[in-house]
Image: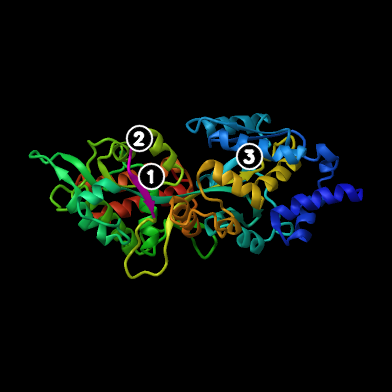
Amino acid sequence: MGSGKMSIFQSVLLGVFGVFIVVAVLIFAGFTGLVGGENVIGEVEIWGELDDRAFTTVISSIVESDSSMRSVTYVRKDPRTFHSELDAALASGRGPDAFLLTQDRILQDRGKIVPIPYDQLSQAQFSDTFVEAAELFLADEGVLGIPIAIDPLVMYWNRDILSSAGIAQPPRYWDEAYTLSEKVTKRDDANNIRISGIAFGEYANVNNAKGIMSTLIMQAGGDIVEKDTKGELTADLSDRQGTVAQPTESALRFFTEFANPTKKVYSWNRSLPSARDMFAAGDLALYFGLASEAILLRAQNPNLNFAASPVPQVRGVDRNLTFGRVYALAFPRSADNGAGAIAAAYILAAKDTSAMLAEARGTPSPRRDVLAQNTGDEETAGRVFRNAALVARAWLDPDPEQTDAIFKGMIERVTTGVSRLTESIGRADQELTDLLSGDE
């Protein structure tokens, strides 16, 4: 390998890991196909469900100064069919060189991908570079994906509704949501909700309901799944002795009270529009959405007077926490150009590139050094998004569609009066246990 070619490698790798140059050289040392000046990466096709405009913009910007990325393309797939299309493509050997893997698909897809061994990228180096929520991509066999995006849950609030009710600031703690709901919710003589304080209590028309419930459970000190003494994943909504874990019970009780017509805080029911549509229409005070939804809300209603704030926390608990979705580039075993895909992934995850991609998407970077930068937006939603990324957490979901049904059933059995809290949680825990053990 000539000295000129080695300098190209080092310039790329330094941008990815900073002082981790020795480790970076090890990462690429075995990939002789990467040598070749402008053709150092070659043709790489990346699949994902995220909008392609941000990726196209960033890749085009990189190519202006680094022609090695000129044959890297991002193909946006329909989120509704992405995973089935990916599975079919990988099975036939015609899939992409890399694809966007979210933490809720790790358990389903880990057997399809090539991990990066820890002797090439250590757990400590990964954790020092990326936010804590990304650590779900650290598996026994190595790093399952290189994080390039994070989408944390935040609280959007309608300035006009709160001001009209004499409320100067959005709630910082969950108990303040009770007072807010009572003050701002408006109902007609038939008890139909016209203006809602908070869209909690149902599942089908509450966007991000699973993420909200996950936040409430984790904030209360609980887990959804955990590893047992043998390292196996187990459900943790209830304990093994049959006594309902207090965090899940308190979270479910709080969430469902807002859908109880007998309560003063009643502010939501299943006959209403989706929470996001109602917020965009100006008829919902608080909406809990992902950072990426800010752009969608502005598009739905350019005149909506709203702001973003952190998700409320449990009063008296020092540890802040919210739910977040992490996107990482993973490398399928059937990739035609796996070496080039890894090289491209490290460029896309580099500090400057990560900052560009975050700005283009309107979401925070998953890199700690980017989040630490002062970007001049300290009083805007950007600060809220960055702080939320730092405290974001998630869990290993065995099957997002089936756990949607489990959470939906757990909530609706309570709101319809079919089951008591403890009974509904116990059933959900058993369903999740069966899913984790493959008995479904």
Residue drawn at point x = 64 percent, y = 61 percent: 123
Q: Residue furthest front?
A: 376
Q: Front-most of 112 and 360?
A: 360
Residue annotated with mark 1: 208
Q: Label 2: few (<14), some or many (≥20) within 10 Å?
A: some
Dot label at residue 301: 2
Instruction: State the CA–CA distance, disc 2 to disc 3.
Output: 28 Å
Q: Residue at x 31, y 64 (%)?
A: 246
| Amino acid type at mark 2 | Asn
Q: Earlier in the sequence, mark 2 or mark 3?
A: 3
Q: Nearer the viewer, mark 1 or mark 2?
A: 2
Q: Are marks 1 and 2 in contact (CB under 8 Å)?
A: no
Q: Say what secondary structure mark 3 lies in.
A: helix
**Of the pair 164 and 265, the residue shown nearer to us:** 164
Residue 388 image point, x, y percent:
46, 56
Q: Position of residue 143 (x, y in %)?
A: 65, 53
Q: Residue at x 31, y 67 (%)?
A: 315
Q: Which numbered disc, 1 or 3, marks the residue that appears first in the sequence?
A: 3
Is residue 199 visible in the rendered image? The answer is no
Amino acid type indicated by mark 3:
Val
Q: Amino acid at mark 1?
A: Asn
Q: Dot 1 surroundings within 10 Å: few (below 14), some, or many (20 or more)?
A: some
Q: CA distance from mark 1 to mark 2?
A: 20 Å
Task: Point out which mark residue 108 bears.
Answer: none
Residue 118 x, y percent position in the rendering: 70, 58
Determine which quarter of the picture holds residue 167.
bottom left
Q: Is residue 43 magenta?
A: no
Residue topped by disc 3: 58
Q: Which region is colored magenta?
A: 301-309
